[in-house]
Image (tube, rainbow, N blue to C red):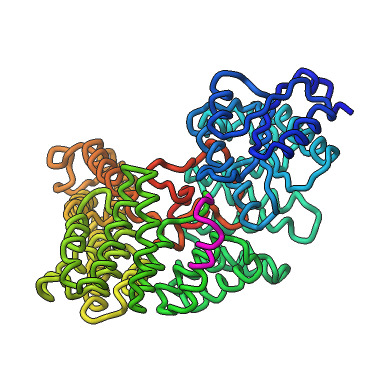
Amino acid sequence: MPIDKDLHLARALLVEGNALLRNVGATQLRDIGVGQVSTATRLRDARVMLERERFDIVVCCRDFEESEQSGQDLLDELRRERLLSPSTVFLMVVEQASYHHVVEAAEASLDALLVRPFTAVVLAQRLSEARQRKRELGAVLRALDAGETEAALVRALKRFSERAPYWMYCGRVAAELMLTLKRPGEAAMLFDKLAGASPKDRGPAWARLGSARARLAAGDVGHARRAVLAVLDDERGNADAHDLLGRVLVEQSEFDLALEHYRIATELTPGCLLRQQHAGALAFYHGQSDFALEHLERALSLGMKSRLFDALTLLLIAMLRHDQRDAGAVGSALGMLRRLHERHAGSLRLERLVISAEALHLALLQGAQAAAGPVAELAGQVTDDSFDLEGAAMLLALSHRLSGAFGSPVEYEHLVQAVGRRFAVSKAITEVLVAAAGRSHPATGILHACHAEVTDLAERAMERAMAGAPAEAVRSLLASGEETKNLRLIELARSMLKRHAARLSGVAAGMPPEDSPAGLPELETLAERAAALAARVGHAVNHIAGIQRSGRAPGAMHLRGVGQPREDQPAEPRTESPVPG
């Protein structure tokens, strides 16, 4: 029976490697009214067909025997290269509805997930719902697919305000887009409206957690914590709430409690690959080696092919196995990292992970001094613009294990100081760096001293600004920021520029002589200098390695076309902002 009046005009492509299942699937599509059905047995054949022809429907099996690629890889490639029309419905077929498959479907913005065995009635229902949603939300989805975030936001807000069909969905899309556009205050208000729009209890959990994520993104950690706890008061078994609370607690440096909530989240959703990785990574930093290894290896068993798998998991396993003097296990992890790097040549991140694993393997086989070359190579990158917090934490963890790779203790201390001056931007991040360095002496003292130095520089600059010399304060911050590449100092300079724009441009009355236009570079020059510096190094402190890397924020919806995976980060979709949300 036709599921909509135009279905007989639709063209479908079925991608399935198994001949019997392919025949069954094609018959089901024809039986429910699809006009033309083509089939492909291999992913590469499907890609060629989709390049040359337009299909209204794609039904694709996720896993193919004797193939390293999956249906998910095909979808990612089609989206990345804009080969899939926004109007095309893409349905993925899986053998079982494991938790991480469901999360993957959300990450990929699939139109539907079909679990075998399914009937023609179920297929018709999923297809009908997807096609109806495509028609109703066509303008919003087209803008999202094209990466036109502002246009998508305007269109979603319009449908929300008009209470048009799917208006709650559009409100949620709009709130998520506001977070993407770094407008957390507006996002929080919209999430609050969405929570209030439901007569059920205090509103849907996703809306209340969205409000918490928005508050966290705005820096209101206390409000975010209270909001998540309120959700948990109503729903003790809400895994997203436990996950988000774990991230909030990391921000507040309460690592013991954070790990406990991550543990609960993994128990509630044992098939969630991301949560296994997050719990394992935090346990690694916290020195709970057995717990860390259990969860990291469970993540590995869930599948490297998943778009949610993070290659960092392999390096953390290698470090823990190195501590057990298990050269075979370290070599195995190294081999897997090398294969990933071969598949994604040019990835600086994967290159660093491979070099780190090579150093661990060499140290076990030949002694710590044999790892001096790889360690020195990584240490030489600390001041590179591309070096990031993950690289810094892993370098400290590696150096702690391979202290014999340094020519002298002084070299090690200089390395720790360079890392600390650049990355000690907050108490939480400083403590993560301390943990990565094994809480050893002298690393702990050096890192705490670096954090104190950065805090002192920031406070003195603020005192200068309040004393009526904002230009001097900005110049001082930028000079220190250029020397250390510390993002906290750079962002504080930008904040001061914005706050004191009137004074710096000579508009304010009673300006001190030292801040007069004649003795001060133009406001635009300072702003450009600060913006250029932030653009160069701003990416460097955007997550706590292994804990806040993924684009999957608890309770969030993943939006097609927004924050797609970058080619230099193949192991997972890295779209998350500096704080969860």
Q: Position of residue 20 (x, y in %)?
A: 74, 38
- Taking depth in this image into account, of 460 and 439 the one nearest to the observer is 439
Q: Position of residue 84 (x, y in %)?
A: 58, 28
- Is residue 535 toward the left or the right of residue 152 in the image? left
The stretch in magenta equals: 297-306
Q: What residue appears at the point 16 percent right and 54 percent down from the top-left corner?
A: 483
Location of the N terminus (image quadrant): top right
Q: Is residue 94 above or below residue 436?
A: above
Q: What residue appears at the point 32 percent right and 65 percent down from the top-left corner?
A: 393
Furthest-bottom residue in this view? 441
- Is residue 579 toward the left or the right of residue 345 in the image? right
Q: Is residue 249 above or below residue 565?
A: below
- In the figure, residue 518 lies in which quadrant? top left
Q: What residue appears at the point 78 percent right and 25 percent down from the top-left corner?
A: 34
Q: Main secondary structure of the magenta part?
A: helix
- Is residue 155 toward the left or the right of residue 490 in the image? right
Please say whether residue 516 is visible from this viewpoint: yes
Count the numbered circles shown.
0
- Taking depth in this image into account, of 454 and 396 the one nearest to the observer is 396
- Taking depth in this image into account, of 131 and 209 the one nearest to the observer is 131
Q: Position of residue 424 (x, y in %)?
A: 29, 65
Whether 301 is among the magenta residues is: yes
